[in-house]
């Protein structure tokens, strides 16, 4: 991650530039209290859905477009809320609504299968 001010290369999860102290434009999920903020690999701390049925998650997302039911089923609450808000904002555009819908269907399936991590 490059500093927008001084172009110094910083760690990907850094919040501030090591050189000039400028805030870096990242929005990482808040780390759990038992984990160090620095020095952990980017894949650490990711949570995955367990015991979820990918087919059910897919169907739930398919039949209720824009409601992110598949995400809530997976326990992916943060992503579900983002999709809900996104669907609301984009509800006046067919393309936007369709994009959120397709995203939620594919994501619900992949997360339930364990191919993708949860956001929260
Ligand atoms: Zn800098």
Image (cartoon, helix red, strand yellow):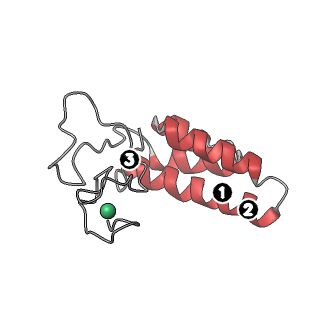
Which one is nearer the viewer's eye here, 48 or 64? Answer: 48
Residue ID for mark 3: 28
In this rendering, would 63 be left or right of 56? right
Which one is nearer the viewer's eye here, 81 or 115? Answer: 81
On residue 100, the disc is 1
Label 2 CB less than 8 angstroms from ligand 1: no
- Judge depth for marks 2 and 3 and give the one in front: 3
Quadrant of the snapshot with the C terminus: top left
Residue ID for mark 2: 96
Residue extending furthest left? 39
Which x, y percent locates residue 24?
38, 56
Q: Residues within 10 Å of mark 2 (few under 14, many from 20)?
A: some
Q: Residue at x 29, y 45 (%)?
A: 46
Q: Quadrant of residue 30?
A: top left
SS label for mark 1 = helix
The reply to whether dot 2 and dot 1 touch (C-beta < 8 Å) is yes
- Judge depth for marks 3 and 1 and give the one in front: 3
Q: Residue at x 46, y 49 (%)?
A: 54
On residue 58, the disc is none
Label 2, label 1: how far apart the Cα atoms are: 6 Å
Which one is nearer the viewer's eye here, 105 or 56? Answer: 105
Q: Quadrant of residue 10?
A: bottom left
SS label for mark 2 = helix
Which x, y percent locates residue 56?
53, 44
Q: Residues within 10 Å of mark 1 (few under 14, many from 20)?
A: many
2 or 3: tag closer to the N-terminus:
3
């Amino acid at each position: 991650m490059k500093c927008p001010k001084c172009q110094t290369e910083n760690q990907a999860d850094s919040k501030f530039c090591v050189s000039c102290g400028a805030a870096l434009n990242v929005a990482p999920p808040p780390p759990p209290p038992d984990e160090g903020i620095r020095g952990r690999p980017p894949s650490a701390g990711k949570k995955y859905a367990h015991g979820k049925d990918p087919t059910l998650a897919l169907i739930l997302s398919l039949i209720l477009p824009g409601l992110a039911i598949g995400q809530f089923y997976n326990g992916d609450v943060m992503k579900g809320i983002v999709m809900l808000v996104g669907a609301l904002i984009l509800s006046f555009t067919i393309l936007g609504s369709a994009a959120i819908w397709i995203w939620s269907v594919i994501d619900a399936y992949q997360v339930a299968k364990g191919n993708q991590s949860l956001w929260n």
